[in-house]
Amino acid sequence: MKTSHRFLAGFGLAAAAVAIMGQVGLTTMPPNTVFGRIGVGAFGPGGAVPLATLAANLGIGVTAHSVPIGKGSTTAGFNAAATGTSGAVLIDQGAGSDPAFQPMTGSCSLAANGAISCSGVGSGVTSVTANYTVLPGDCLKTVAAGGNTQFTITVNSAATYGACQLDISNVDTFPSGRGKVLAVSGLTTNPGVLYPGMTMTLLNVNGAWFQKPGISISTAPVGTKLYVDGVNGDDSLNDCLATAQACKTLNHVVMGVIFNNLEVATAGSGTGTNASFDVRLINDAGCAPLTGVNCIHGLHMSGPPRRSEGHNSIMIECDGGSATNCTIADNSGNQAIGLYCACFLELQNVTVAGGSSGNNALQAEKGMMRLEGGVVIGNAGSVAQLSAVNGGTIILEGASTTHVSSGGNFFAQVSSGGNIQLDQATIVWDQDTAYSQTLNANNGLISATTTTWTTGGHSITATNNIACSPGGFIVTGGTVATVPGTNTPSGCASSANGQYD
């Protein structure tokens, strides 16, 4: 029987569907199918369409456990970001590529349950015993440098590391430990050498290395030796702890390495053979004091070693045991050795010359300088070879011998409360020498009560062997005539202008 459209409208949509089903017959759909029609053409009765067929026609071909990624508006279908590495992260690869899973690199990892773990500073360690270049994987770690040898740790441009912080530690210990030279791109580190026990923290800030403050100090045993070679030494590349890696200048060793980086292990240690730091000068033949060629540049000491307690000392001596070829000479307008602090400095078996600029060979302005023997005093131009001012003291140790190889305006001069003690020492001239005055005291004290003056057959001349200005005292113990030079004391006859015995 034919059913009219008016009849279908009367019964509504549901009744129409029943009527149609009655015409085409009741069909049971198989599993994993949908009801529809695939293909181009007029609409007609539908059929069972397998899901696989539908997926293939829609361009959906993802594998199990992968993530579908749309191809975009101009290309139908999907791609898939394949999994396979637990803890990998789906990362945008840019406008021209599909996102992809990438495992985490560096010092952090991501677990399958979402937990992130990183090796923080101090917990991750890279141990090295030879020249080493820091890697990106060392960020958030400690580079532990050991091996009791000097080597270089290089840190490349900060831009090559990304976000990065790391510690660099010298894990050596004294007395066999050695320094580790730092070469950090774009940054002059302070210090340039890490000594045993020292740690430095570097931080990448906006693509440039930054040294975090608060660096640790190295604790050195009493008697630690540091070496200076005025010809072959290097202040920037050597740790000064061996003859082959000697530094070049005294100022760098004393006011750089010792003052900034080291402290003596035992506070209040003794002097002489038990000095806190033993600075050894390497023999270099051919030093010309008047030009400074092949000489060791001077020392201008303005601070004491750490934990010095006022009477720790720095000993400066020739490593070969003789003053020959171990000459300290300064031609920059300063004293060859100047002491400008409440410090204690000792000299032994070295030659000290004022150079060509009319400088004092030795000057103590505050503090105490002691000559232990074997010291040779060179030229001083128009000033004194030995000068003590502003409360400074120079002592020629008892039973020691000091040689004089040249001259100046005065052999010894004090002013403004300076003090020079020549008692019990032996002073030997190695060549003819002329002074204006041998000993000159201006508001200070020179004591030479038991000094042995030895000319060695040379002519030692001076207009006045001693001279005093107001407040100046020269004490000779009644042996003023033995002081080299013409025995015509100047200004020393009355208590108003100083006095002598």
Image (cartoon, rainbow, N blue to C red):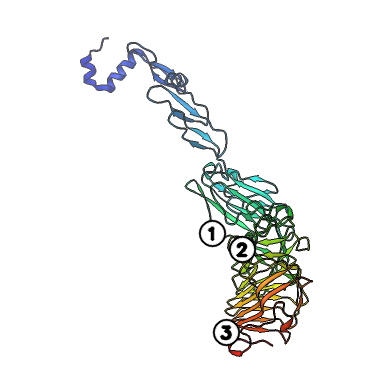
Q: CA distance from mark 2 to mark 3?
A: 36 Å
Residue 199 or 106: which is nearer the viewer? Answer: 199
Q: Is residue 98 above or below residue 219?
A: above
- Quarter of image, res 42: top left
Whether residue 391 can be seen here: no
CB within 8 Å, label 1 to label 2: no
CB within 8 Å, label 3 to label 1: no
Horizontal side, residue 165 vs residue 127: left or right: left
- Quarter of image, res 2: top left
**Residue bearing mark 1:** 213
**Residue bearing mark 3:** 470
Residue 161 or 390: which is nearer the viewer? Answer: 390
Horizontal side, residue 154 vs residue 243: left or right: left
Q: Nearer the viewer, mark 3 or mark 1?
A: 3
**Residue bearing mark 2:** 255
Q: Which residue is painted at 22% across and 19% down in the image?
A: 9
Q: Which element is circle 2 on?
A: helix
Q: Amino acid at mark 3?
A: Pro
Label 3 environment density (alpha carbons within 10 Å; few <14, some 14–19, many ≥20): some
**Residue lying farthest top?**
1
Q: Amino acid at mark 1?
A: Pro
Label 2 or label 3, whichever comes before in sequence order: 2
Residue 443 or 466: which is nearer the viewer? Answer: 466
Q: Which element is circle 1 on?
A: loop
Q: Is residue 207 above or below residue 442?
A: above
Q: Which element is circle 3 on?
A: loop
